[in-house]
Image (cartoon, rainbow, N blue to C red):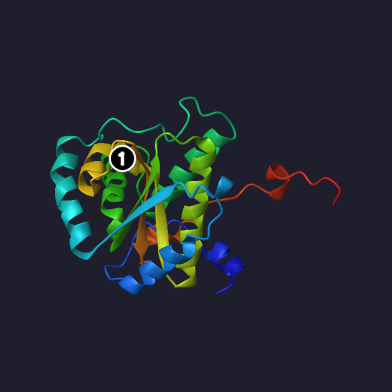
Amino acid sequence: MSVSEAVRTRRSCRAFLPDPVPGATVRAIVDAARQAPSGGNLQPWQVYVLANEAIAQFRALLAPRLLATPGGEPAEYAVYPPALHEPYRSRRYQCGEDLYATIGIGREDRAARLRQLARNYDFFGAPVGLFFVIDRRMGPPQWSDVGMFMQTIMLLTREQGLDTCPQEIWSAWPRTVGEFLGLRPEWMLFCGMGLGYRDASAPINTLRTERAPLSECCTFLGL
């Protein structure tokens, strides 16, 4: 698979098959992703990969806490600015509407929307879950480095015929994730990711979010 095809076919998968992913494949993906760029070669990422017994144990730990506190714990950071302005507000709104439309959930059905939201905490059924961690003394430039590392993993995953779903929503469970992983106080949970085989029969995986035209996001000078 070419890089262009991996970029074109990558999407956030929200329904995975239960089929296990070979450990050697996951290790090869993460190993190759180490070549991702970072300012000053800081390589400010740490990644924890859960599968098999480990992911089952994590799900068992989280389940009763999720029932007791559905809203999560004090979050590490706000995923979106508190007053999201245009055009970003409309893009986020449309993404949500299009997502729920694929599975027939209307805006007024709050209970169904919350049930779907909670599927994040099962990695959407993925057999492999990843948690990305960064030293909390780092700044926004290093956060962008972690993003490039994650994108590299996502594209390498597509090369293997697999899919992913990056999940910033995990920032709402820093204590539970930190407890399970044994994180030191200086490590901050940044993001999670499900990885596995896409369920091609799941309607939710038909979602294709729109992208702004090139003229809205790029200015060419001298070309």
Residue 219 location, quadrant: top right
Residue 78 percent location from the top left of the image: 41, 31
Q: Is residue 195 above or below residue 170?
A: below
Q: Nearer the viewer, residue 97 or 171?
A: 171
Instruction: Name, please, the residue furthest toward the right.
Output: 222
Residue 110 percent location from the top left of the image: 30, 38
Is residue 161 in view from this perspective?
yes
Q: What residue is rendered at 46% in x and 54% in y? A: 150
On the rendered image, what quadrant is the N terminus found in? bottom right
Instruction: Name, please, the residue furthest toward the top.
Output: 83
Q: Residues within 10 Å of mark 1 (few under 14, many from 20)?
A: few
Q: In the drawing, does residue 134 fall left or right of residue 145?
A: left
Q: Residue at label 1?
A: 109
The tally of labels here is 1
Q: Nearer the viewer, residue 107 or 99?
A: 99
Q: Secondary structure at mark 1?
A: loop
Three-letter code, disc 1: Asp
Is residue 173 in view from this perspective?
no
Residue 170 location, quadrant: top left
Residue 215 percent location from the top left of the image: 73, 46
Q: Is residue 146 above or below residue 163?
A: above
Q: Nearer the viewer, residue 76 or 218?
A: 76
Q: Nearer the viewer, residue 126 or 38?
A: 38
Residue 123 percent location from the top left of the image: 30, 54
Q: What residue is rendered at 19% in x and 52% in y? A: 59
Q: In the drawing, does residue 3 fall left or right of residue 11?
A: right
Residue 160 location, quadrant: bottom left
Q: What residue is rendered at 49% in x and 71% in y? A: 159
Q: In the drawing, does residue 64 fall left or right of residue 175?
A: left
